[in-house]
Amino acid sequence: MKEKLLRIAIPLIIALIVVIFQRVSAPKIVNEAGRTARLGMNPQQELSLGAQAYQQVLSESRTITSGANYEMVKRCAGRLTAVTGEAGKNFQWAVSVVESNQVNAFCLPGGKIVVYTGILPVAQSEAGLAVVMGHEIAHATNHHGAERVLQEKTANTLLTGANFSLSGTDPRQHQQIMGLIGAGARVGYLLPFSRDHESEADSVGLKYMARAGYDPREAVEFWKRMSAQGGGGAPPQFLSTHPAHETRIARLKAELPKAIEIYHAAGGK
Ligand SMILES: [Zn+2]
């Protein structure tokens, strides 16, 4: 009996020790949203991983390098990245426009931005584009990708520990329990983090667009249009990890007065 208990407990204890070590040795920052976060990559790793992923995307896509849309995306990226302050200081910014009807845009760790032409009809204007880009840039300046790396590491270490501690049980039962623990980790641990990341990216993105002189009220209008896009069929890819529209729009509305102040201070009317 005692032996069986030890066989279950020891792998879990080892996993816990490893997790504690992983977290204590991870770089700690206070992010743009004011929250203390531990990261699974340092800035140098973020830059090189981001640049690598950027090259990969560009090598597989057709890019646009001239025309009104290209100029607008470049200008908007320039204005937004210029107001990221201390958080974006060591970023190596670059932006590309990919010809594709995917409703998508992202900013990789370290500052490489990709905008798909498919999102432009939803953006409708440069201010609408600033909503999306501000949001994506805010994910990067808040180091959400690096934080995610550490979270996945923590979850994987604990799952490995659980897997070892169950190694003596009946294989079918073992598989069932691991499935439950895995689902629990996703819903209870990883998903709440991604919701935090979304609301931080909204709030910091709103601040960036206002600082850059884009009317922050456009954020509410943009997300309404995105919501209309998703109606009926499957939501566009861009939305798959994003929260319910009503929640997001209500939260943005609550943050508008402060953002409008920033906008006015930046010379906006
Ligand atoms: Zn997002």
Image (tube, grey):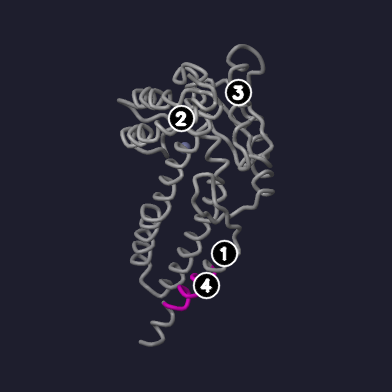
Residue 209 placement (x, y as % from top left): 52, 28
Comparing 260 with 197, the one in front is 260
Distance between mark 1 and mark 2 Cα atoms: 41 Å
Residue type at the position of mark 2: Glu
Q: Which comes sooner in the sequence, label 4 or label 2?
A: 4
In the rendered picture of this protein, how many numbered marks are placed on residues? 4
Against 102, residue 56 (above or below) is below
Q: Residue at x 66, y 30 (%)?
A: 94
| Residue underneath mark 1 | 22
Which quarter of the figure is the N terminus placed in?
Answer: bottom left
Mark 4 or mark 1: name the one nearer the start of the chain. 4
**Which span is picked out in magenta?**
9-18
Q: Which residue is mark 3?
A: 97
How busy is the neighbourhood of tag 3: few (under 14 within 10 Å), some, or many (20 plus)? Answer: many
Q: CA distance from mark 3 to mark 2?
A: 31 Å
Q: Which element carries disc 1, helix, strand or loop?
A: helix
Q: CA distance from mark 4 to mark 2?
A: 47 Å
Q: CA distance from mark 3 to mark 1?
A: 37 Å
Q: Amino acid at mark 1?
A: Gln
User: Which circle's residue, 3 or 1, is located before the other in the chain?
Assistant: 1
Dot 3 or dot 4: first in sequence order is: 4
SS for dot 2: helix
Report the residue that reaches farthest toward the top.
67
Q: Secondary structure at mark 4?
A: helix
Image position of 119 (left or right of 256): right
Residue visible at 48% across and 39% down in the picture: 201
**How far apart are labels 3 and 4 at the CA level?**
45 Å
Name the residue type under label 3. Val
